[in-house]
Image (spheres, coloured by chain):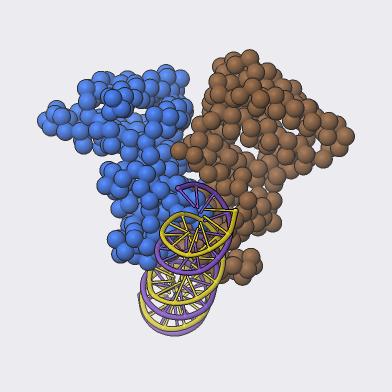
Chain colours: A brown, B blue, C purple, D yellow
Amino acid sequence: MHIENVLLRPPVTASDRVLLEIQKAIVEGSIAPGSKMSEPELAKRFEVSRAPLREAMARLERCHLIERTPNAGARVVTLTPQGLLSLYQLREELEGLACRLAAENMAEGEITELRDLLDAHLQTQRVREGESYYQEAGDLDFHYRIILGSKNPYLINILCDELYFLVRMYRVQLGMNGPRVSRAFDEHKAIINAIANRDGELADLLMRRHIGASRQNIEIQLQNKGN
Amino acid sequence: MHIENVLLRPPVTASDRVLLEIQKAIVEGSIAPGSKMSEPELAKRFEVSRAPLREAMARLERCHLIERTPNAGARVVTLTPQGLLSLYQLREELEGLACRLAAENMAEGEITELRDLLDAHLQTQRVREGESYYQEAGDLDFHYRIILGSKNPYLINILCDELYFLVRMYRVQLGMNGPRVSRAFDEHKAIINAIANRDGELADLLMRRHIGASRQNIEIQLQNKGN
DNA sequence: CTCTACACAATTGTCGACAATTCCTGGGTA
DNA sequence: TACCCAGGAATTGTCGACAATTGTGTAGAG
């Protein structure tokens, strides 16, 4: 009952490779939201046949980066306030659950590693103040480990494989760096403590708040962009 | 931002048709759990080429009915107590959320329809006492409508497209009919009332309990089977 | 007798071409 | 001028064959 996580395995096949490239392009916006995904065009651009390309597109649909209609083609998703709200409603619930389960199921060693990771991340953060990439990567890593710590394969699959690309897309395309960086560290720290104390209920609550705050932060950016 | 629900659209393409057939076969167990899914064999059996078959298998993987490993092939999932627990942990959380959102977002008309559905279902149930099929179908319909009522496209997608086939597989293959039928009606009724009163918090709680009870019921069957 | 290495068979991944459907354009009509 | 319908171009869905990889069985060495 081990569910493969396509993120964590090297791109063994051609469609794996193309998938990663297109995912990156969509998340970073170099393929514009709402634009049409022409199969012949993309196949030529990424130098593969249409077979692996279609396989990749099936997986892109799975992680909600494109929307397909039979016999009509696919388009890149568009970012909307409603979409963001729906996404974060889910994330709050699911990552809350992940925290609760992680508090029950994470090994002591995993918790220690998580602490070390946060410390290491804090240092690089101090050195390279303002560079949002490290914040992004570090934050992602933190959430990933907790999700994996839940040991629930379906939950892991949904969050890491299906929802997180969209989360990243919203954050990247709205240019997240901002003033939340330092506060996020404290919140992360508190969550780790709760997990280390095996207090699932508290960990759940803190994670929900953490994500709620993150959502509000993005919503502000989205409003600013709208005006 | 409308996410297509493959369940609710007629099978327009060949891979759609094959997908439905194989899903049915796996859920009902006529393709045994753990058995290998040979592409040439299945293509011949369902009278399609390997291209649409592979597309169907990609979607089977998406709803967790098969597990694939690159360059090695796919196997039907096996049912385990741990798997069931993981699945229902998620369901409790997600359908609880769905109820809360449904209480906020369902139109009055939809709620009325839901009531009518339950009443109609109750009558056929009385008439054909003991036939588990109607229970299955009616229960499914009830849950579906609430999920759709949440109006959260990601939530709908995960529950209806990705998780429900597995839920059905567990129930069908463990032969669910049992004594829970009548009590489930009362629980359904209470949930509808909470939604009608726009009491999301209560609806959430009741749905979690409802699913928890359902899980315990299945776990008992699973234990009996093991002994 | 056991273990390793090689070669063969079978399966999966990929390719290019064909069929079916959709979308777009242009012409005709009210 | 606006609307509708037909025709053609382009795109998606499907097919059969080829290439690449895996698993297996066998032969040989230790």
Name the quadrant of the C terminus of chain A: top right
Q: Is residue B109 left or right of residue B68?
A: left
Q: Residue furthest left?
A: B127
**Image position, residue A214 (x, y; %):** 67, 31
Q: Is residue B137 left or right of residue A149?
A: left
**Image position, residue B63 (x, y; %):** 42, 44
Q: Is residue A16 above or below residue B195?
A: below
- Please tell me which residue is depicted at 64% across the width and 65% down the height of the picture: A46
Question: Which quadrant would residue A210 be assigned to in this image?
Answer: top right
Question: Which quadrant would residue D25 be assigned to in this image?
Answer: bottom left
- Please tell me which residue is depicted at 34% across the width and 22% down the height of the picture: B216
**Image position, residue B124 (x, y; %):** 16, 32
Asked if residue B163 shows in the view, the reply is yes
Q: Is residue B27 above or below residue B56?
A: above
Between residue A158 and residue B57, name the one nearer to us.
B57
Asked if residue A179 shows in the view, the reply is no
Counting labels gives 0
Name the quadrant of the N terminus of chain A: top left
Q: Is residue C13 left or right of residue B5?
A: right
**Image position, residue A225 (x, y; %):** 71, 43
- Please tell me which residue is depicted at 30% across the width and 60% down the height of the picture: B46
Between residue B127 and residue A9, name the one nearer to us.
A9
- Please tell me which residue is depicted at 49% across the width and 39% down the height of the picture: A2
